[in-house]
């Protein structure tokens, strides 16, 4: 077999390293990758869902054996260009020295070298990719010998596919969907240049697609409401047609009961509601057809301009997205955090419950939504839509997640925002809550626009902090308060001031069930509960 010209030589001592017994498995050479193409789910998950699915399965029944493959490391470095040689040399030096000072130097040199190698590997998501390379992109596992047996057993059991079809992505999945155009690349703070030609038409197509998705979402919502009312109507009709026969006279039944008379009144209300929904649907169908026509017209213009809509992977887009992902990783680690990008037993101290693998994240989302039911809701044309943001799972250490953007700039109505989570936080619950708090703040701020300092959640919070002369970054203060709101205040454990509790109670309301429970705990919560009743009876609520 001909060797790849970029294939570095692997020190046999390094390649045979094992965290458990200090004996390396031998790897003779790099392996040429197969041409088998991974399947791609080209449809993004549905945004019209009432709740997250029940996570009935968290681990694979048949764990992978890839970490026992003696050629794992070779497969990771295959086709890595010059960057694979560099990272290989540094890893050998890092693993081969016991001097603390030297290890610190090699550790710092590995960080930029690894990201360069990572960048060279990312474009391969569009074609065939070995399982070891996928694990490197997904979990930061470049060499299984850097992990102990317990850690390897854990990662071997993780579910590979997105079985619940939720918008939670590992990095290999994320790069692939961005590259083929299923998801727009993440926005950046770069100075925008005036678009011309195809670029300008592409932006018009993104806006038109956004309007089409918004129209589709509203139509689905209205249709779902109509079906619910029709089902209820059928139930009511069945209730009033259940009659008791009058035995003394044939073909005569007793009059309606009080309950049936009340049901008839309810039927009248449902019929009025169905007529209202029908009028709304008529308008929504018209809007949808217009949006679909506009999107199709612009799409044809794009084709005429040079077939700008690509079905393959756009390498430039993927590499641009890589820069955003690296910046996300830096932000989550923080200035004083651990920026080492490779997963090793030296730093991997998380328990199974604190690793941000997909099923754990969905379970935590479900818990948060059970407390803050409007966390993923946005209003559009008087309708409340539940839109879960894209969640990117980044193989890095860090204590906090972040919100990269609250929604797509071309579709503020129904587009998903995007948040990023470190796969290896010390406390998964806190890491996710910090990202959700950031998301909550940015959505509210964008919604208030120029009035963010005097309206709504952000305005009231800003005025509260100003009055109290609180110092520090306003958003960071809010995130910490939001964490207290979800973890403590929802349990009736006071952590916020009376004024701040009132702001959160109104703009970040708990579920009615939690409110009912809290009102019996103390006069403070009882007073807030009464305010809800007073506001609901006024036009200003």
Image (spheres, rainbow, N blue to C red):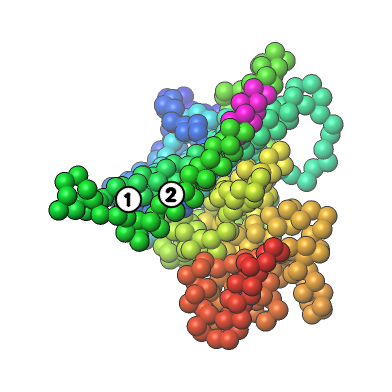
> Is 99 above or below relative to 146?
below
Using the image, tell me which numbered label, if any, was put on residue 267: 2
Q: Position of residue 268 (x, y in %)?
A: 47, 48
Quarter occupied by residue 458: bottom right
Work out whether residue 520 or residue 267 is closer to the camera in this orientation and state it: 267
Q: Residue furthest bottom?
A: 523
Q: Which residue is mark 1?
A: 240
Whether residue 402 is visible here, answered yes or no, is yes
Asked if the residue under mark 1 is in contact with the one under mark 2, i.e. CB atoms within 8 Å, the reply is yes
Question: In the figure, is residue 204 to the left or right of 393?
Answer: right
**Residue at image point 25% right, 54% down:** 254
The Cα atoms of the two marked residues, 2 and 1, are separated by 10 Å
Q: Residue furthest top?
A: 304
Secondary-structure class at tag 1: helix
Whether residue 6 is visible here, answered yes or no, is no
In the image, the segment drawn in magenta is 284-295
Q: Position of residue 250 (x, y in %)?
A: 16, 46
């Amino acid at each position: 077999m001909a060797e790849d010209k970029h294939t570095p030589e692997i020190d046999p001592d390094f390649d045979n390293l094992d965290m458990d017994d200090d004996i390396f498995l031998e790897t003779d050479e790099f392996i040429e990758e197969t041409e088998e193409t991974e399947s791609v789910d080209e449809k993004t998950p549905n945004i019209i869902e009432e709740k997250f699915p029940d996570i009935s399965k968290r681990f694979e029944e048949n764990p992978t054996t890839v970490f026992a493959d003696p050629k794992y490391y070779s497969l990771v470095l295959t086709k890595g260009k010059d960057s694979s040689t560099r990272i290989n040399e540094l890893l050998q030096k890092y693993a081969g020295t016991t001097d603390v000072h030297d290890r610190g130097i090699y550790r710092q040199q590995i960080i930029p070298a690894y990201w360069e190698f990572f960048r060279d590997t990312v474009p391969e998501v569009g074609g065939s990719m070995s399982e070891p390379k996928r694990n490197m992109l997904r979990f930061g596992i470049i060499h299984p010998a850097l992990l102990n047996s317990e850690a390897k057993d854990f990662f071997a059991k993780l579910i590979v596919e997105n079985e619940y079809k939720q918008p939670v992505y590992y990095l290999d999945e994320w790069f692939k969907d961005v590259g083929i155009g299923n998801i727009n690349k993440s926005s950046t703070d770069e100075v925008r240049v005036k678009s011309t030609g195809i670029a300008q038409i592409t932006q018009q197509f993104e806006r038109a697609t956004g309007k089409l998705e918004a129209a589709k979402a509203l139509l689905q919502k209205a249709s779902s409401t109509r079906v619910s009312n029709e089902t209820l109507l059928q139930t009511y009709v069945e209730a009033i047609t259940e009659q008791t026969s009058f035995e003394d006279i044939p073909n005569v039944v007793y009059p309606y009961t009080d309950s049936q008379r009340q049901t008839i009144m309810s039927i009248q209300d449902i019929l009025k509601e169905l007529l209202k929904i029908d009028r709304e649907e008529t308008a929504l169908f018209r809007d949808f057809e217009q949006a679909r026509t506009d999107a199709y017209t612009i799409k044809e213009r794009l084709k005429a301009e040079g077939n700008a809509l690509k079905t393959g992977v756009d390498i430039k887009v993927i590499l641009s997205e890589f820069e955003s992902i690296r910046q996300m990783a830096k932000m989550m680690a923080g200035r004083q955090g651990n920026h080492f990008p490779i997963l090793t037993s030296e730093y991997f101290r998380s328990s199974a419950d604190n690793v941000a693998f997909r099923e754990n994240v969905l379970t935590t989302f479900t818990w948060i939504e059970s407390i803050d039911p409007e966390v993923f809701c946005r209003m559009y044309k008087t309708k409340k839509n539940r839109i879960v943001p894209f969640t990117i799972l980044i193989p890095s250490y860090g204590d906090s997640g972040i919100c990269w953007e609250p929604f797509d700039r071309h579709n503020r109505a129904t587009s998903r925002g995007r948040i990023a989570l470190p796969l290896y936080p010390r406390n998964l619950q806190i890491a996710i809550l910090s990202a959700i708090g950031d998301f909550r703040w940015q959505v509210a701020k964008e919604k208030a626009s120029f009035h963010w300092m005097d309206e709504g959640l952000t305005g009231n919070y800003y005025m509260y902090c100003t009055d109290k002369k609180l110092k520090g970054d306003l958003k960071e203060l809010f995130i910490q308060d939001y964490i207290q709101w979800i973890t403590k205040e929802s349990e009736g454990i006071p952590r916020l001031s009376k004024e701040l509790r009132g702001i959160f109670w109104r703009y970040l309301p708990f579920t009615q069930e939690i409110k009912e429970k809290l009102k019996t705990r103390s006069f403070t919560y009882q007073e807030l509960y009464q305010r809800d009743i007073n506001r609901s009876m006024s036009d200003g609520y």
